[in-house]
């Protein structure tokens, strides 16, 4: 999948997670969804870590243990702020509900990346580094190239999801729903 598609899927995921939240919470969720959606490829293709850790594209960064680990790190950091375990300026302290929403947005944003890549020919190996088992989401004849029709469909689905939530929120706000 192309980078723009992963970012759009991440934004859609974040927005869906925070569909009924306040605007600032939703904005944070969209940002974290985008960050989660872009993170696995950023790590493999652009970060300074890729050389020092000898990362290959779609390696451990595209696995469920990594998603769980990264989400847990973010969750603990946000929870420490929310619970007051760490001192921070009040404007930086989220409520516990916000901490949960933001952690979910990041985790699901990363998952959207894995699911999207699992629709392509190469598939993903979700149990790395523990197992090299490879998995695809679609039967062989439906799998596509990373820049092919699957990519276009994912982009459309993201735009559709974002558009629907925005229309729904505007309707609620203006009293039509
Ligand atoms: Zn990827």
Image (tube, helix red, strand yellow):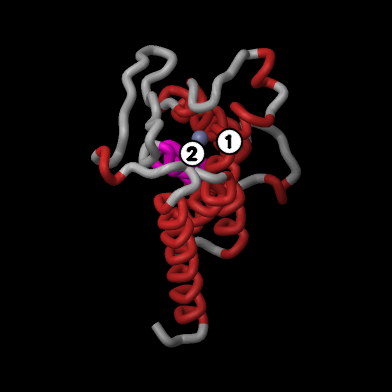
Q: Which residue shows up at 48% across the image and 57% down it? A: 155
- What residue did someone put label 2 on? 110
Asked whether 105 falls inside the magenta stretch, the response is: yes
Dot 2: few (<14), some (14–19), or many (≥20) neighbours within 10 Å?
many
Which is nearer the eye, 29 or 36?
A: 36
Which is nearer the eye, 125 or 120?
A: 120
Asked whether 173 falls inside the magenta stretch, the response is: no
Q: Which residue shows up at 48% across the image and 38% down it? A: 110
Q: Is residue 18 visible?
A: no
- Dot 1 falls on a residue whose secondary structure is helix
Main SS type for the magenta part? helix
Which is nearer the eye, 79 or 104?
A: 104
- Residue 153 locus on image (x, y percent): 41, 57
Please tell me whether residue 6 is drawn above or below residue 27 in the rendered image.
above
Residue 125, numbered circle: none
Q: Is mark 1 within 8 Å of ligand 1?
A: no
- Dot 2 falls on a residue whose secondary structure is helix
Q: Is residue 89 visible?
A: yes
- What residue did someone put label 1 on? 39
- Residue 156 locus on image (x, y percent): 45, 62
Please tell me whether residue 68 is drawn above or below residue 1 in the rendered image.
above
Q: Which residue shows up at 57% across the image and 56% down it? A: 25
For this orientation, the residue located farthest to the right is 89
Q: Which residue shows up at 46% across the image and 86% down it? A: 175
Question: Quarter holding the C terminus?
Answer: bottom left
- Residue 55 locus on image (x, y percent): 58, 18
Dot 1: few (<14), some (14–19), or many (≥20) neighbours within 10 Å?
many
- Cα gap from disc 2 to disc 1, whole angstroms: 7 Å
State which region is magenta.
103-117
Tell me, yes or no, whether the two marked residues, 2 and 1, touch with CB atoms within 8 Å: yes
Please tell me whether residue 74 is drawn above or below residue 96 in the rendered image.
above
Indicate which disc, 2 or 1, sits on the residue closer to the N terminus: 1
């Amino acid at each position: 999948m192309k980078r723009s598609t992963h970012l759009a899927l991440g934004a859609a995921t974040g927005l869906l997670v925070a569909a009924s939240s306040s605007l600032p919470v939703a904005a944070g969720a969209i940002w974290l969804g985008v960050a989660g959606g872009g993170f696995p490829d950023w790590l493999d293709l652009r970060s300074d870590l890729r050389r020092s850790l000898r990362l290959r594209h779609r390696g451990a960064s595209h696995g469920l243990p990594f998603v769980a680990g990264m989400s847990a790190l973010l969750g603990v950091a946000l929870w420490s702020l929310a619970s007051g375990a760490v001192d921070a300026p009040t404007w930086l302290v989220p409520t516990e509900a916000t901490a949960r929403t933001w952690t979910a947005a990041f985790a699901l944003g990363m998952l959207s990346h894995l699911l999207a890549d699992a629709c392509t020919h190469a598939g993903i190996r979700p149990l790395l580094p523990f197992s090299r088992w490879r998995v695809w989401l679609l039967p062989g004849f439906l799998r596509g190239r990373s820049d092919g029709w699957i990519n276009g469909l994912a982009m459309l689905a993201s735009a559709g999801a974002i558009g629907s939530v925005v229309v729904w929120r505007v309707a609620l706000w203006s009293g039509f729903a």
